[in-house]
Amino acid sequence: MPVIVGAIAALLTFIVIGSLLAPLGAMGPVEIAVIAVVALAAGIAAGIWEARRRRS
């Protein structure tokens, strides 16, 4: 279950940040890569949080 929570958090983070920055324009490969890294970090953090929550 933590993997599912992490994947959902990563996907939602990517969508939200991307949709907020898209109207500003200039969404090049570097910006997309940064958004992907932030989304990955959010997904990992959510997965770890869910795993710890389940254990306690």
Image (cartoon, rainbow, N blue to C red):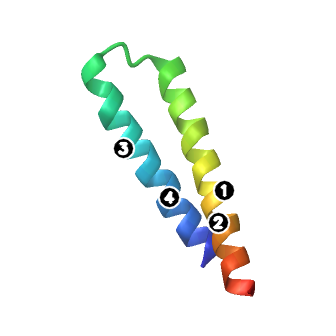
Q: Earlier in the sequence, mark 4 or mark 3?
A: 4
Task: Look at the numbered disc 1 and give the secondary structure of its residue.
Answer: helix
Q: Are marks 2 and 1 in contact (CB under 8 Å)?
A: yes
C-alpha gap between disc 3 and disc 1: 17 Å
Q: Is residue 18 shown above or below 42?
A: above
Quarter of the image that includes the C terminus: bottom right
Residue behind mark 4:
9
User: Of the residues shown, which amino acid type is indicated by label 4?
Assistant: Ala
Circle number at residue 16: 3
Residue ID for mark 1: 44
- Measured in 3D between alpha carbons, the distance from the residue under mark 2 to the one under mark 3, in whole angstroms, is 18 Å
Q: Find disc 2 in the rendering and name its residue.
A: 47
Kind of residue indicated by mark 3 = Val
Examine the rendered structure and indicate whether residue 7 appears above or below residue 30: below
Q: Nearer the viewer, residue 4 or 50?
A: 50
Residue 52 relative to residue 19: left or right: right
Q: In the drawing, does residue 20 fall left or right of residue 14?
A: left
Q: Earlier in the sequence, mark 4 or mark 2?
A: 4
Is there CB contact under 8 Å for labels 4 and 2?
Answer: yes
**Which comes before the other along the chain, label 3 or label 1?**
3
Could you tell me residue 19's position as x and y percent?
30, 36
User: Residue 46: x percent and y percent?
Assistant: 60, 62
Q: CA distance from mark 1 to mark 4?
A: 9 Å
